[in-house]
Structure formats: C-alpha cells, structure tokens
Amino acid sequence: MTARPDITPADAAHPGPSADGSGAAAANRRTVISVDAMGGDAGPASVVAGIAASAQKNPDIAFILHGPKAELAPLVARHRELAGCCELRDAPGIVTMQDKPAHVARHGKDTSMWSALESVRAGEATVCVSCGNTGALMLMSVLRLRRLPGIYRPAIAVMWPSRNPQGFNLLMDGGADISADAKDLMQYALMGASYARSGLGVSRPRIGLMNVGTEEHKGRSELREAHDLISAHARGADFDFVGFVEGRDLPGDTVDVIVTDGFTGNVALKTGEGTATLIADLLREAFQYSILSRIAALLAYPSLRRLKKRIDPRRVNGGVFLGLNGTVVKSHGAADATGVSAAVKLAFKLAQTGFSEKLAERVAKATLMAQDGGPDDDAPGQSDAPNGAKT
C-alpha cells in the first residue's frame, strides 16, 4: 500500500499549522474523495486519468483509490499529479454492470465499491465517487451509510443544462427507485431544494412537480397529493413551489428543481443524453455536406465549440445520492477521463459546502415540523399512517 497523504476530512474543514511551516499545512487543507476505480465501462485507466486531471487543477484535493492494487499501482505511477495525494486500497473484487444488487450486497465485501463506501462510513473521506452498477451502488450505500432519519427513499439528483442563470436545473429522482408516492415526492422536493442551495448556489430554489399538464386536476392521485404536501411545506421552508410542470420545462427557466419518480426521471435523462448526441451528429453531417458547408463550419467553429461544451453530457456527469448519512456521487458508467473529472469536481464542491450536514439539518427540521403539527397537517389527503416500512 502506498504511503497515505496526511489528510483527513476534519483537517480539510479545520486546517492546522504544520510543525515546520512547510507543505504539511497545505496537505491538511485537502478534501479527501474516496473513488471506486473499477466497474466503469471504460476501465480503471479512465478513472485514474480523470482523478489525475482533477489533481492537476485543484491542489486542495486528495484521493483514496479502491481496486486491485497490482492493476492500479502502474496506472497511478504514470501520473505525476497523483504523487503524494493518492492512497491505494487493495480491493480485488469488482462489481460488474450485470451483477444483481442483492447478490452484491450479500457477497461483495471484497469489492472496490464496498471498500470505497467504507472509507466514507469510517470518516476517512468526505464523498464517494463510483462509475459502477447504479442499483448495486444505491443498495450498498443504504446498507453501509444508512438513510437519514425521516427519509423513506433516497433519490438521485442529476444536473440538466438550462436557461437559468446557474446554467443547470436539478432533476430528481434520476433512477434510484422506479416508483414514488406522495410523501416520497415531497421529500425529494426538500432534498432537491437543499442541493440547489449548496450545489448550484440558488438562495431560494423554485420547485416544480413533473406531470402531464400544469392544471391542478391532472395526473395520478399521488401526484395531486404530492402537490398539496409540497405546497404546504413550502410555506414553512425557504423554497418556492410553482406547482405542476411538464417535460419541456426541464431545460427552461421556470424552475430550478424538477421532482418526479425514478422511472420517469431516468427515461427523461437518457432521452436528453441521446438527443444531445443526435444534435451533435446531425450538425457534423450537415457541415460535411459540401465544400461551402465545410467553409461555413470553419467560420462557425468557435460557436460550435461553445455549444458542444454546453451540452456535453460528460461535463455534467455525476448524479448525487440524496438522503444518506454521507455523500455519494454516481458517475456515468461510460464516463471517460473528462466525465470522471467532472464527477470529482462536483464531489469536491459538495464536500466544501458541508452539503451532507446541511441536508441532514433540513430533513430533521422538516420531520419535526410534521411531527409537531406543522405544514403536513394542513395538507389535504395526507395519511396519518407511518411509512417507515419503506425500503
């Protein structure tokens, strides 16, 4: 095992003076990210290249890299940027995309994914980043990190390019759970508002609930009930609820957070990724049609490059698992070095803002409001039955 850099999450939050006044103080300021090097489609080489790119841009970051040491050590040695800021943790097992989450949860203690989550659980790292199997990562995250008190179902929040000043909207759930009832959707709204404040810098987020129309009488009964619950909580929280929104509002400037179930959210996410790729391919085909179109492409190249950067799915890579005692960033399974670097950048930003602690405080406050006869009691159609049996 390589020598571990002198870094801890506590040191990152409370940097102390070094004995000799040299580089030790700088090391103490580093935020530690736990990275699962295995499981992605592009293999560990892309993951190592991605964290190396992040280390080159940001001297305040360090890594605990999990996977087979014999395979990772030569890859890490190729990148001078990782010298002194990357520790290897030997974990021979690999969670593949074909593995069933339940099987991995029972038999995956030797895997890089399990090891990466354990570093967060033990307080050695602030955030976990993985490109691996989404279902397995979510289930193992729930088992090892546990849900926040009062949370029924964790959710995946993903960023969507938009016309808003911050450049992105949040969509949740992005696929953690294919179903969601009214209380789940209400909690997604609370968690999404907290993420928008910490991750996007939106002081008073606007929340929208995805439906087939904006009229209050449309949609399934659980959507109408969720509408009332979110509206009631908005009166006592620092976010605005704009009501029902439609799919066309995902890239718009009407809302900052769009709430929906995991099935709908994942379909929307994959549709958006496919559409971005299609637009890029069609533009490339159009500009190669003739000599004149190729000349036009040269003239338009700076603008096309800015457009490509804006809609490139790799640069907004990273879905965040919300509702856990710890932060987990799920990178796209097919992410290359650029995508991994983007996921690490997001993880670092959330760690720096103390996102996990702030989210826990807001969820606890909302739970107390409901127990004390707060906004929940005003929501029509709410059941008094406990929902703690959910998984």
Image (spheres, helix red, strand yellow):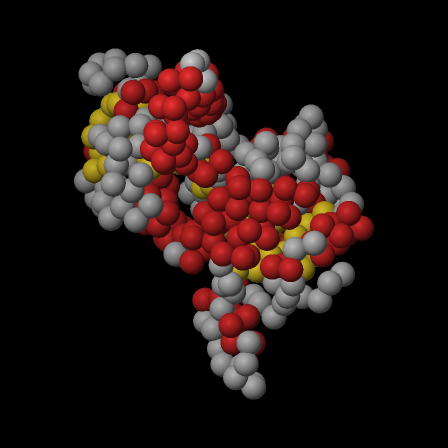
Residue 19 location, x and y as percent? Answer: 56, 85
Viewer-closest of 361 and 24: 24
Give the residue furthest to the bottom: 20
Residue 182 quadrant: top left
Residue at left offset 50%, top offset 63%:
60
**Which residue is pictured at 57% across the width and 67% down the height?**
7
* Residue 131 falls left or right of residue 103: left
In the rendered structure, the answer to whether residue 161 lies left or right of residue 274 reads: left
Q: Residue furthest right?
A: 70
Vertical placement of residue 88 versus 142, above or below: below
Query: Is 46 placed left or right of 328 in the picture?
Result: right
Residue visible at 51% across and 63% down? 59
Residue 335 falls in which quadrant of the image? top right
Give the x, y percent position of residue 138.
56, 36
Whether 192 is drawn above or below 76: the answer is: above
For the N terminus, the quadrant is bottom right
Q: Is residue 231 visible?
A: no
Residue found at x 37% / y 47%: 199
Is residue 362 depicted above or below 248 in this figure?
below
Query: Is residue 30 found left or right of 381 in the rendered image?
Result: right
Is residue 341 visible in the rendered structure shown here? yes
> Quick one: 33 or 54, which is closer to the camera?
54
Q: Position of residue 311 (x, y in %)?
A: 40, 31
